[in-house]
Amino acid sequence: MHVEILARNVPLTPLLRDLVERRVRFALARFANRVQEVRVRLDDLNGPRGGLDMRCHMTARLRTGGQIDAELTDLQIEPAICRCAERLARRVRDAGATRIVLRRRRRAKPPVPAPAE
């Protein structure tokens, strides 16, 4: 799984890069066979003004061709990264569960009609 990190108005230090890599890989470890690439975008929305302005947006590109997004805004960038990775993992899990249910429904055999007397 490839992890790409983009930062706007957020200093991308080696420590922050390492945190993003570790959190994404840990959260999506169960789904490594489904996820091909994860793009992480970190933004400081308000600049130096402060407030609820650190946004983390993650997009997972799946091997089946689809994509799943998760976004979170917080006061600090580290909690935003951690919670966004967890949210993305839940959405990947839910997308896989939906696919399994649909596959089971398709395999179900039609009921056999009762013989006429």
Image (cartoon, grey):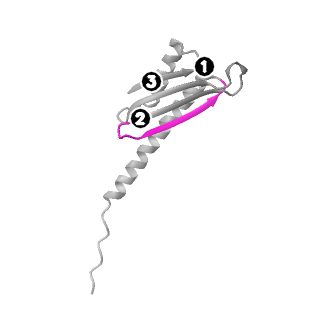
| Residue 11 in magenta stretch | no
Of residues 105 and 58, which is closer to you in this image? 58
Q: Which residue in the structure is indicated by mark 3?
A: 4
x, y percent for residue 115: 27, 80
Most common SS among magenta residues? strand
- Pick whichever of labels 2 and 3 is earlier in the sequence: 3
Residue wearing tag 1: 9
**Camera-nearest label, 3 or 1:** 1
Q: CA distance from mark 3 to mark 1?
A: 17 Å
Q: CA distance from mark 2 to mark 1?
A: 25 Å
Of callouts 2 and 1, which one flags the residue occurring earlier in the amino acid sequence? 1
> Residue 31, image x and y in percent?
39, 35
Amino acid type indicated by mark 2: Arg
Q: Nearer the viewer, mark 2 or mark 1?
A: 1
Q: For residue 12, which quarter of the picture? A: top right
Q: Earlier in the sequence, mark 3 or mark 1?
A: 3
| Residue located at (39% from left, 48% from top) | 99
Instruction: Name above or below for residue 54 compared with residue 63.
Output: above
The kind of residue on which mark 1 rests is Asn
Q: Which residue is mark 2?
A: 61
Q: Which residues are magenta?
A: 61-75
Does the residue at mark 3 contact the one at mark 1 (Cβ under 8 Å)? no
Q: How many marks?
A: 3
**Cα–Cα gap, marks 2 and 3:** 11 Å
